[in-house]
Amino acid sequence: MASKKAFGVLWILLSAWICAGKISGRGRSCGFPAIYNFGDSNSDTGGKSAAMWEIVPPNGETFFGKPSGRFCNGRIVLDIIAERLGLPYLSPYLDSIGTNFRHGANFATGGSSILPGGYSPFDLDIQIGQFMQFKSRTSALYKRLRTLLPLQNILPRPRDFSKALYTFDIGQNDLNYGFQYTNETQVLASIPGLITKFSQAVSQLYNEGARFFWVHNTGPLGCLPYNVIYDQSKLNDLDRHGCVANQNKAAQEFNRQLKDKVFRLKAQLPNSAFTYVDVYSAKYKLISDASNYGFEDPHKFCCGGYYGFQVNCGAKAVVNGTVYENLCTDPSRYISWDGIHYSQAANLFISKLILNGSLSTPPNSLAEACQNPQKL
Ligand SMILES: *[C@@H]1O[C@H](CO)[C@@H](O)[C@H](O)[C@H]1NC(C)=O
Ligand SMILES: *[C@@H]1O[C@H](CO)[C@@H](O)[C@H](O)[C@H]1NC(C)=O
Ligand SMILES: *[C@@H]1O[C@H](CO)[C@@H](O)[C@H](O)[C@H]1NC(C)=O
């Protein structure tokens, strides 16, 4: 009898605790059933490799044991995001072999930019168009599923589209292309147009039923080793950590406007939840304090090299009888994998900083990214 009473009290306490948790909202996992990602090589899990040229070894060597379509020796941040949500790694939409879209799809491809006319044909508008086609075609197929039962295991459930997490990491190539072909003034002047286009893309997804958005800002462009190498003419424009100062300044201006736009979108789109994630700070923190975190000089990289001419990761050049290639023995000690893309070790470090919400506005962790606090 006494124990029954104790059990009752415990039950009430437990219910109250659960209720309080629900009301306060914090700490409650959103249970995202799928991820839809849009971006460039920072979050490409094999799109460019499938659509254009297959990525060669030693990419993938550390984790997958073979090239995995990623510009990395192992996992990228998006892979860690999938792991944290208990979902499989995302298949690239553009890959026609061995894909599974049950828990989402990845529209990111290496070289992609927000606006068309950059390094890749798959700009953000195209990626959104691909998503819309993906959604309408899978929804149509689903209606006929009784005759196509095995497809249930590889297609998304239509009802999951509005429960999924929509992730973005794009803008770096717009800025990089700008610095390559125009000047700083023009790059800064191009930013409002980029932000407008980004905002239109988000609104289109919202109209398709997307509600939960996880937006990475852009990293410190001027710290990419190749950008430092190419900008030797600007040696007096390096910041105190050896990064190209005006490129980082432009990245920060892009981020300032992006954050402002995300704030406006959240106010405009009812029942939406936005998490703005300061990836820039995570990357810059790692680069500016590399040795303290056990890494080599942040401007060195592991695969490929520059000898007055560029030898890409996995390539070999023979000039005047000399063979030029470069493979480091311990990728875990390098922040940059190939002079442009981060190593798995760096990606794990960055993920640790960004996924618990400490660099996010509002401070949602990944699992809480469906929360919609009034203030951003
Ligand atoms: C940047 O380029 C534009 C267009 O060519 C030119 O008018 C402007 O003077 C340049 N600005 C700087 C600071 O070089
Ligand atoms: C290769 O040899 C040519 C002719 O001697 C020379 O002009 C060129 O700079 C050499 N290239 C390299 C990378 O050493
Ligand atoms: C998030 O993780 C970082 C890195 O481990 C840590 O320094 C920070 O205190 C954590 N923040 C929260 C809110 O848990």
Image: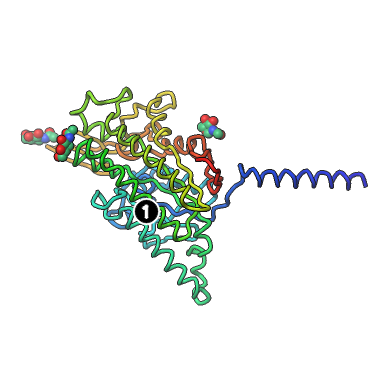
Vertical arrangement, residue 325 with respect to residue 294, above or below: below
User: Is residue 183 shown left or right of residue 29?
Assistant: left
The residue that appears at 39% across and 47% down in the rendered structure is 43
Q: How is the image coloured?
A: rainbow
Label 1 beta carbon less than 8 Å to ligand 1: no
Vertical arrangement, residue 281 with respect to residue 260, above or below: above
User: Is residue 31 shown left or right of residue 82?
Assistant: right
The residue that appears at 30% across and 55% down in the rendered structure is 122
Residue 50 image position (x, y, % from top left): 33, 57
Front-most of residues 262 and 6: 262
Q: Residues within 10 Å of mark 1 (few under 14, many from 20)?
A: some
The residue that appears at 30% across and 25% down in the rendered structure is 239
Front-most of residues 224 and 221: 221
Can you see residue 88?
no
Front-most of residues 54 and 375: 375
Residue 3 image position (x, y, % from top left): 89, 45
Residue 65 image position (x, y, % from top left): 41, 47
* View extreme (right): residue: 1
Q: Amino acid at mark 1?
A: Gln
Q: Secondary structure at mark 1?
A: helix
Circle 1 residue: 200
* View extreme (bottom): residue: 147
Residue 350 image position (x, y, % from top left): 44, 36
How many marks on residues? 1
Can you see residue 23?
yes
Vertical arrangement, residue 35 with respect to residue 364, above or below: below
Vertical arrangement, residue 16 with respect to residue 127, above or below: above
